[in-house]
Image (cartoon, rainbow, N blue to C red):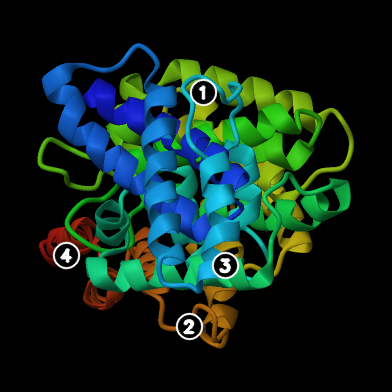
Amino acid sequence: MDSIDTHLLRDLAPQVLGVVARRFGDFAAAEDAVQEALAAAAMRWPEHGVPDNPRAWLVQVAVRRMTDHLRSELARRRRETVLVAEEAVEYEEPREHEEPEQDDTLLLLFMCCHPALTRPSTIALTLRAVGGLTTEQIANAFLVPEATMAQRISRAKQSIKKSGVPFRMPNDEERAERLGAVLHVLYLVFNEGYATSTGTTLQRADLATEAIRLTRAVHRLLPRDGEVAGLLALMLLTDARRLARTGANGELIPLDEQNRALWDRDAIAEGVALISATLSQGSIGAYQLQAAIAAVHDEAARAEDTDWPQILALYGLLMRMTDNPMVALNHAIASAMVQGPAAGLALLKPLDADARIAGHYRIDAVRGHFFEMAGDAAMARAHYHAAANKTSSIPERNYLLLKASRLQNTE
């Protein structure tokens, strides 16, 4: 399969799943049937070419798989049950081009964020059902064995089946209830793509790109929602720096050392336009504020031109809005950049007692940076080493060790 066909399958997967799940009313079985159809396409299309209507082709194959599945199940039942069910199977026989063109991506997204599911299950199922990623790809993204991820996805599908979730777009009230979870899942998927938490690579562009695509779809559904627009802007403004974040060998390049000529100016312009429009509409949420901070960074021609007082003020607002310890950590960084390293170090102390973040490698990394700013090379090295020993990301570990090594020559 070439890259075009791979992207085509990924784009079509949620649409086909929507058709089959809506038709048979069994999400778990429909998801399995669609995966079989995608596998069949991956085998056939490279040799015979992509059909004129690939969506209809996939629907037809998936429906046939569902029909075979139903017939197999019915064969185990009593005769009277078989007679009744066979009528249903006969009714479900696929017919080409009978399904109207309808993108069920958002419907699937909101269904995968049903309150019956745990957050890890929600993320895995969203990537599988909506993102079109294979179980192997999702397992690789989270660095767990494929069998473990398969079990997680299977449990998620069973939870949906048991909960009796109807395959329809939630009403306004249900949608409002799930929107926060939908945005949070998309945010987590993007973050995992932008800064992969474990492994040998710093970032996973496919995950970040998929998160942006899905957030765009939610934004088209809810164009007046400020937080949806804010999250999309945040992703665009952050992802715009992707090419400059790593060197030729995949090494981490910090923000203040990046070649800003490599930043994606179109993405920055779109992100700035989005956040500028939504900030003028009234109430402001956490994603909007984070997008505003990202915009300040992106609009600085050089690192030394960064408007840190404005960033500090925005983090001050964000601190009042959320109890997120990562926000407190970033607030400490902004404080150090404006008021000096002593102010930053003072703001880090409360985080040592916060069970949600205490012992996290980023506290040591930031503390090392503050001591380096203060000219205390020995303390800076100690904290860089401590952070390197805690992170599971190899590029981040190498970067921290390099920082410590460079300081050794200054002591």
Residue at 17% in and 47% down: 251
Measure how far apart labels 4 and 1 are at the Cα level: 32 Å
Disc 4 secondary structure class: helix
Label disc, if present, on residue 342 of the rendered structure: none
The CA span between labels 2 and 1 is 34 Å
Residue at x 77%, y 37% (from the top left corner): 226
Cα distance in 3D space between marks 1 and 3: 60 Å
Q: Position of residue 56 (x, y in %)?
A: 44, 24
From this viewpoint, is residue 403 visible?
Answer: yes
Q: Give the spatial CA distance, label 3 vs label 2.
A: 59 Å
Mark 2 / mark 4, whichever is N-terminal: 2
Q: Earlier in the sequence, mark 2 or mark 1?
A: 1
CB of mark 1 within 8 Å of CB of mark 3? Answer: no
Where does the N terminus fall, quadrant-wise? top left
Q: Which residue is mark 3?
A: 81
Label 1 crowd (10 A; few <14 / some 14-19 / many >=20)? many
Residue beneath disc 4: 401
> What residue type is disc 3 on?
Thr
Q: Secondary structure at mark 1?
A: helix
Mark 1, residue position? 268
Residues tagged 2 and 4 counted as in contact (Cβ below 8 A):
no
Left or right: 273, with 128 as reference point: right
Q: Amino acid at mark 1?
A: Ile
Q: Which tag is nearer the camera, tag 3 or tag 4?
A: 3
Q: Nearer the viewer, residue 176 or 323?
A: 176
Does the CB distance between marks 3 and 4 fall below 8 Å?
no
Query: Which of the pair 288/29 is nearer the observer?
Result: 29
**Amino acid type, label 4:** Leu
Q: Amino acid at mark 2?
A: Ala
Q: Which residue is mark 2?
A: 358
